[in-house]
Amino acid sequence: MQTQQTTPETRQEPSTPAPETPIFELGSKKRKKRRRIIAIAVVVVLAALLIVPRLAGGGPANTPQSSYVLDTVSRRDITVVVSGSAALEPADSYVVNALVGGEILSADFEEGDVVEKGALLYQIDTGDVENSIERSRLSVERAQMSYDQALDGRDDLVIEANESGVILELMVEEGDSISMGQTIASIRDSATMTLRLPFPSDDAQSFTIGQAATVTLDSTFETLNGTVTEIAPVDEVLAGNVMVRNVTIEVQNPGGIAPQSMASAMVGTAACTQSAAFEYQAETTVTASAAGTVDALLVQEGDSVVKNQAILRLESDSLDDSIRSAELSLRDAQLSLQSTIDQLDNYSITSPIAGTIVEKNYKQGDKLDNSSALSDSLCTIFDLSYLTLTLNVDELDVAKIEVGQEVAVTAEAVEGQSYRGVVTKVNINGTTMGGVTSYPVTVRIDETDGLLPGMNVDVEIEVQSETGVLAVPVSAVERGNRVLVKTGETVEGAGTTLDENGLPVGYEYREVTLGINDDDYIQITGGLEEGDEIAYAAYQGNSLLEQMMNGMMGGMPTSDAPPAQLVEGGR
């Protein structure tokens, strides 16, 4: 940059107003806030420089000389970026913990190994849990037996006929409470009568079951057809030392045979030795096999029934409770068994993700304590297939960020290398600190050669860009969107001296229309033409104030524009 030292046209002290602040929007509001804070600090220091010497009895402090930079309106590319810094993170990470204790039987991997999802990492001794499984199985068997027995008791609530026949009497009514073993009905089979007659032993031994017999009633000498149903296996001795065997014969009752009726019989040509009285084939009582309340009578007196036919039904709250309790006990035992079996999976620890082992804390032969298994980290796995970072974006900039935008990433740890990222998520759950809200933006980086998790990187997200637009330095625009522009008139000292107002001779303010801007340049959409000569206030390069500003801000922004002329005014 070329400089020229000139003096104003008059020797009077110029009354140079402080340059006004231009109105425009910076590409990054965070930088704007930072500069405002720095500017306030500079004003405080400047006030100290002016006031302290006076308080010490000295004369007025020396003030910086007025100076202007002469420049030309030109075309350039302007890119608006949102920038910041963040730490890199792996695509995914997982700290592996144990859910059970025991001795580690195998741990066949080392730090740096790449493992697939589901790969076996640790195998823990299962001896204790296998014993628990066996005990749980026994508990299930016992509970099943109790439940089956309770269900059998429910079957006892249905009272059945123990023989075929006719219901002679029902001793209970619906709603009656009965106890176990109580007689509830009597049954008689009068359709079939039986005779138990003695036959000579030699004859009886030749009879067969089912053989036909002829029965003769003693009272009427009426004959009936009968059937041999039973032959006694041993002989008996009657009076006169007659050897006989008792033979049972069944006869269908024509309706007039009673138990007091007497009759004799012949089987083939063999005749019984004496007559006998008829008996009913069946006459029995039915007793309750369980206690309860009669819920329903299923037959009436006089009804014919067959053996095992239900004749009444009981209900029992206590039995229902017993069945329900047994059922719950069985279910509890089954769940306990299943839970114990499921614990077997906890003894084989597999990798929850595909990735690289970055830390291994336990090896084969180590023992895990049950109390600390959950808190102890067995190993740590990073998925390094790509890296991510979370950039906290100011509330004024977050609306400019969209998923899919490209991101430029650089790292001090990897000099001379830049990386490409892409925005994958804009989180609307912001965090407010000091009255400023920021929102986390997630960026994914696929090409990561040289980068490692934990590295700090600088990030720039291009949110707007214009090519070949008219632009001037940001410092050239003053409050009211005004720019000092050369008038074009031939005036002595134009562009080389300052007038009585401390402005470059031959220059005047012109209102302009602004477009986008970055940190250094701002687009001019109206009011100026390409090639117009402009001027704007600049700091003295040898002033203490500029040194302080450069130190706080890390140096003034540099530009690739052609060198501009510096016009200075002195006393």
Image (spheres, rainbow, N blue to C red):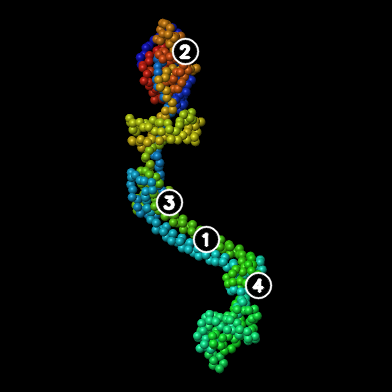
Q: Which label was assigned to residue 302? A: 4
State whether residue 34 appears in this view: no
Per the model, the C-alpha gap separating discs 3 and 4 is: 72 Å
Q: Which residue is mark 3?
A: 99
Look at the picture and state if 498 lies above or below 167: above
Per the model, the C-alpha gap separating discs 1 and 3 is: 28 Å
Label 2 packing within 10 angstroms: few (<14), some (14-19), many (20+): some
Q: Which residue is mark 1?
A: 329
Q: Which of the two marks, 3 or 4, is nearer to us in this view?
A: 4
Asked whether disc 1 touches disc 3, contact meaning CB atoms under 8 Å apart, the reply is no
Asked whether disc 4 touches disc 2, contact meaning CB atoms under 8 Å apart, the reply is no
- For numbered disc 4, what is the local secondary structure? loop
Query: 420 or 481, which is in the foreground?
Result: 420
Q: At 63% from the left edge and 86% from the top edge, which residue is drawn?
A: 221
Asked whether disc 3 touches disc 4, contact meaning CB atoms under 8 Å apart, the reply is no
Name which of mark 1 and mark 3 comes first in the sequence.
3
Q: Amino acid at mark 2?
A: Tyr
